[in-house]
Image (cartoon, rainbow, N blue to C red):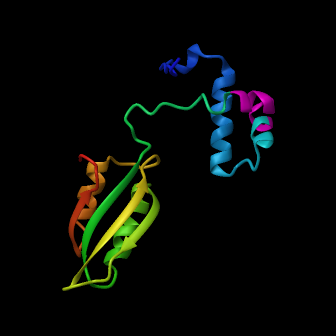
Amino acid sequence: MADEYYIVRSKALPEVFAKVVEAKRLLGSGAAHSASEAARIVGISRSVFYKYKDDVMPYREDGHDRVLTIQSMLEDKPGVLSSMITSFFDAGANILTVNQNIPSNGSAYVTVSIRTANMEMTVPELFERLKSLDGVISVSGVGTVI
């Protein structure tokens, strides 16, 4: 039988599921260094944590927690890449990778992959901010409809 998934309001579920999600968050953020420590902090047993850890996860309605790859063409002048990186930081994006080609004819391709979970703006707003930076020639999402 194939796995079935349900979207259920958290208040309809036993409290243990919310505690498992919180324990996973503690582990992911580094606030807890082991499953035992995370389980103890949230008030569940380690065996309960392991029983449900792969089956319970928070739902993000807007798909806000995703990895996005952005390709841009930047002018070959000091500070352009730095201002772009600063814009990602200011937006709350978590930078996963940065790849820059060697400049040719006064410009260079830069590809940046980010995690959007903690962004304080929408992806289209981020793109507009990036496009407005001095020295940014173009910005596009790779495999993403914006």
Quadrant assignment, res 77: bottom left
Query: Left or right: 2 with respect to 136?
Result: right
Query: Left or right: 113 with respect to 53?
Result: left
Residue 57: image location, x then y, percent:
56, 32
The residue segment tinted magenta is 40-51
Query: Can you say whether 43 is above or below 92 in the image?
Result: above
Quadrant assignment, res 35: top right
Question: Looking at this view, is 30 or 141 the one in front?
Answer: 141
Query: Left or right: 2 with respect to 64?
Result: right
Residue in the picture at 39% in, 37% down:
63
Residue in the picture at 79% in, 33% down:
46
Residue 48 is one of the magenta-drawn residues = yes
Residue in the picture at 63% in, 47% down:
28
Residue 87 in sight here: yes
Residue 107: image location, x then y, percent:
23, 80
View extreme (front): residue: 1
Residue in the picture at 75% in, 40% down:
38
Query: Left or right: 79 with respect to 44?
Result: left
Residue 22: image location, x then y, percent:
65, 35
